[in-house]
Amino acid sequence: MKKKAFITGINGQDGSYLSEYLLEKDYKVYGIVRRNSIAEHQESRIDHLIGNGVETEYGDLLDVSSLERMIRTIQPDEIYNIAAQSHVRISMDIPQFTVQTNALGLLNILEAYKNNCPTARFYQASSSEMFGRTVDEDGYQRETTKMSPTSPYGCTKVFGYNMVQHYRNAYDLFAANGILFNHESPRRGSNFVTNKVVKAAVRIKNGLQDKLSLGNMDAYRDWGHSKDYVRAMHMIINHTEPDDFVCATGVTNSVRDMCSYVFEKLDLDYKNYVIKDPRFMRPEDLKYLRGDSTKLRTTFGWKPEYTFETLMDEMIDHWVNIYK
Ligand code: NAP
Ligand code: F7E
């Protein structure tokens, strides 16, 4: 019999790649999507999968009854809680919604899981934003690094991380955290910095845009590819015991480095186009993220197939094809 996976956030960046990965592994995949007033936008990342092994229903992390009903009816083997208000700066504009979705929503699905299908395995999308301003002396963040979040988003993820550990210990559930560093792809929302920069650079190259407005260009991020990170999610949920793992490339670049690489690839000099815009500055920003994923690598043999450069190249090709 096929294994069954239930995914919240299935139509997001990671949800779409995770669905493809699980289909390759012969899973039957179920997911919830929120109602959107423009129906065509709702499932654009997973349109090609609907009816081909993936089934979706309307649902919301804030709607407990639908979560309960679906988990009770489907009886999944694996539950991936990937849904979130995932934008750090926007979490400063809509902190209450962010807390409701990321913290209380996580609690809703944990309860639905405990009460309706406790034999399933549970994966929580935790984040490097939980470490916030803390960096270990060697310049990395790892499972043992102190958590000092600097945004409503980061605070909700610390809540979720702790709740998952509590449910694991208190109710003997297989509930695990993947602490993922930034991961991108052509499917990344275009208001995150990588896709914003790549899209704008290609538009500038094609004469469709003159300038690119950015905030803090001196922030460093450990950028990987979402496809590599969904493989890690599946490894973590299929481990012999529930545990928590950092997933990262170990390579960090600044926003400025990233701009320089992308514009240069298009034979442009970013300095002629990028302007600093206070609208994109954050009241408190994380200066430096670099993950040590030794635990993940030694436990499962995980390693990323993409480098920073091949990730950016794939994103550039994506936008070049759109605007050609
Ligand atoms: P994403 O593209 O923004 O996808 C988020 C998904 O959550 C979307 O499908 C969204 O649906 C859904 N969602 C939002 N609010 C919801 C609600 N109240 N009920 C049900 N679904 C809701 O994010 P991602 O990049 O795939 O990230 C996946 C997860 O990993 C998130 O939890 C994120 O916080 C976490 N994470 C991401 C990164 C990263 O760098 N990408 C790093 C660490 C952790 P709509 O389309 O309807 O909004
Ligand atoms: O910002 C700077 C910004 O929004 C990266 C989420 O997936 O990863 C992501 O969060 C950096 C920050 O991602 C702009 O200040 C400059 O320093 O792409 P981002 P993020 O905030 O790191 C973590 C791990 C998650 O868990 C989150 O879900 O880029 N930056 N100028 C800008 N950022 C944006 N968005 N837009 C700018 O114009």
Image (tube, grey):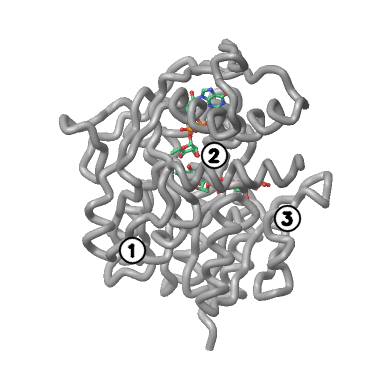
Given the current orientation, which residue lies at the most extreme front position?
A: 267
Res. 95 visible in picture: no
How far apart marks 1 and 2 lie (CA) works out to 28 Å
Nearest the viewer among 311 and 229 is 311
Label disc, if present, on residue 171 of the rendered structure:
1
Quadrant of the rendering where the C terminus is positioned: top right
Residue topped by disc 3 = 43
Check the image and report above or below for 96 versus 309. Answer: above
Verify CB contact (< 8 Å) between mark 3 and mark 1: no
Nearest to the observer: residue 171 or residue 262: 262
The amino acid on which the numbered mark 2 sits, given as a three-letter code, is Ser
Q: Is residue 71 above or below residue 211?
A: below
Q: Earlier in the sequence, mark 2 or mark 3?
A: 3
Q: Which mark is residue 86?
A: 2
In the image, farthest residue toward the bottom: 1
Q: Quadrant of residue 289?
A: top left
Q: 70 or 301: nearer the eye? A: 301
Give the x, y percent position of residue 224.
43, 46
